[in-house]
């Protein structure tokens, strides 16, 4: 299996990283490709310098032609949530919103006895109490939420039914909360949500291969693993009910671009002279904002009464026991992860396209990678 190498700044040993760990990582991914995942790619940096950048596997599920390259583009699913969170924090820095602001002051459909206590903070920390999306808990007959949705009623449809938990009491991963955050970005900024993020985050960071709607000339570089990927990429801005649906997911990116965003967060909100967030705001995003809340994540945690979650403003914190304290990250379905370790000034961005959750490709590479830090 061919391994393709992308641009790097230094050699691993120059920044105190064991080269043999990269051999272990490559072998690990090669053993998974064709069995549990379709492809894999990664970029690693320390002290702001990229020392490893590689990829392997197939670009498309439809044919054998074309390899997954270091600059291949991939849907990033829920990694888009941290871009939405960043947009919210920017508007907060501009004095246009505040964290404990009731959502009903911006979106009138929240102004009722059930939803009026929900704040922007609750949406950012997944503590609003709103129900997770249909199918999240693998229920045999999911609620048919989207079939009768249109431009006029989509907010009421997402709010339909009762709360799953009392607001502010439980961490429950809820993508629709980030749809509402995207709507807040749009209403407060006066821009379409996707336009706001592109103009204020993506373009200033020089993220050339990151967008919500893929230009035709870049389609041949997009990694596809399913017909669902093809359908999602066919959506056009002018025929969507609302681009706020892109708030929780729906972005595409490439490894170098993911690294740029991560390095911005590691740098205290700046990258290449461009300030995206203030230093204190960036630090607040990745420090504990809720601590040891009862957690009910998708599927395996549904009935788990022993799991507790500590969370930042849109970011996951200290998720793995074998990573240093202060490590923050976000992942996305179908295989994407971005991890920042401030103690070691270390970043890992990974793409491991595959259908379903595969711990061997999501978690095991982290242990391999961090074992290489000398």
Image (cartoon, rainbow, N blue to C red):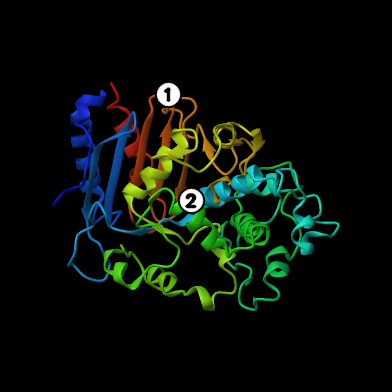
Q: What element carries label 2?
A: helix
Which of the two residues, 278 or 20, is positioned nearer the viewer here? 278
Residue 343: mark: 1
Look at 27% across and 50% down and name the residue there: 40
Residue 17 seen in render: no
Name the image quarter holding the C terminus: top left
Look at 26% across and 71% down and name the residue there: 62
Q: Which of marks 1 and 2 is in front?
A: 2
Which of the two residues, 15 or 1, is positioned nearer the viewer here? 15
Residue 148 seen in render: yes
Farthest residue toward the left?
2
Task: Report the side of 206 relative to 313 (left or right).
Answer: left
Which of the two residues, 351 or 299, is positioned nearer the viewer here? 351
Task: Report the side of 175 relative to 333 (left or right).
Answer: right
Crowding at mark 1 (Cα within 10 Å: few <14, some 14-19, many 20+) = few
**Residue 261, picture quadrant:** top left
Check disc 2 and report the residue beneath it.
201
Residue 157 location (% of width, % of height): 70, 69
Q: What element carries label 1?
A: loop
Q: Distance between the residues labelled 1 and 2?
A: 25 Å
Crowding at mark 2 (Cα within 10 Å: few <14, some 14-19, many 20+) = many
Residue 361 location (% of width, % of height): 33, 46
Residue 237: mark: none
């Amino acid at each position: 299996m061919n391994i393709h190498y992308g641009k790097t700044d230094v050699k691993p040993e120059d920044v105190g990283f064991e080269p043999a760990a990269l051999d272990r990582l490559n072998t690990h991914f090669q053993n998974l490709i064709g069995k549990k995942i379709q492809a894999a790619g990664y970029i690693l940096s320390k002290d702001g310098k990229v020392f490893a950048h590689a990829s392997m596997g197939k670009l498309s599920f439809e044919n054998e032609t074309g390899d997954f390259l270091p600059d291949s583009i991939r849907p990033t699913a829920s990694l888009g949530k941290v871009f939405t969170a960043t947009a919210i924090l920017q508007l907060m820095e501009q004095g246009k919103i505040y964290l404990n602001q009731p959502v009903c002051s911006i979106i009138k459909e929240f102004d009722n006895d059930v939803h009026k206590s929900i704040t922007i903070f609750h949406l950012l920390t997944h503590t609003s109490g709103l129900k997770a999306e249909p199918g999240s808990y693998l229920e045999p007959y999911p609620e048919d939420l989207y079939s009768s949705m249109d431009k006029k009623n989509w907010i009421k449809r997402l709010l339909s039914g009762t709360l799953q938990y009392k607001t502010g009491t439980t961490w429950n991963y809820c993508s629709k909360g980030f749809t509402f955050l995207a709507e807040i970005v749009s209403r407060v900024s006066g821009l379409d949500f996707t336009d706001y993020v592109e103009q204020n985050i993506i373009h200033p960071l020089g993220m050339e291969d990151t967008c919500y709607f893929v230009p035709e000339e870049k389609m041949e570089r997009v990694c596809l693993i399913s017909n669902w990927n093809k359908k999602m990429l066919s959506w056009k801005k002018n025929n969507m009910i609302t681009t706020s649906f892109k708030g929780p997911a729906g972005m595409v990116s490439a490894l170098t671009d993911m690294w740029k965003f991560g390095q911005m967060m590691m740098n205290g909100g700046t990258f290449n002279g461009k300030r995206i967030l203030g230093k204190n705001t960036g630090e607040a995003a990745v420090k504990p904002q809720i601590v040891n809340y009862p957690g009910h994540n998708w599927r395996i945690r549904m009935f788990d009464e022993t799991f507790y979650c500590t969370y930042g403003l849109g970011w996951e914190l200290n998720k793995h026991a074998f990573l240093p304290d202060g490590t923050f990250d976000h992942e996305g379905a179908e295989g994407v992860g971005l991890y920042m370790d401030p103690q070691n000034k270390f970043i890992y961005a990974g793409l491991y396209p595959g259908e379903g959750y595969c711990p061997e490709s999501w978690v095991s590479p982290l242990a391999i990678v961090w074992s290489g830090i000398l």
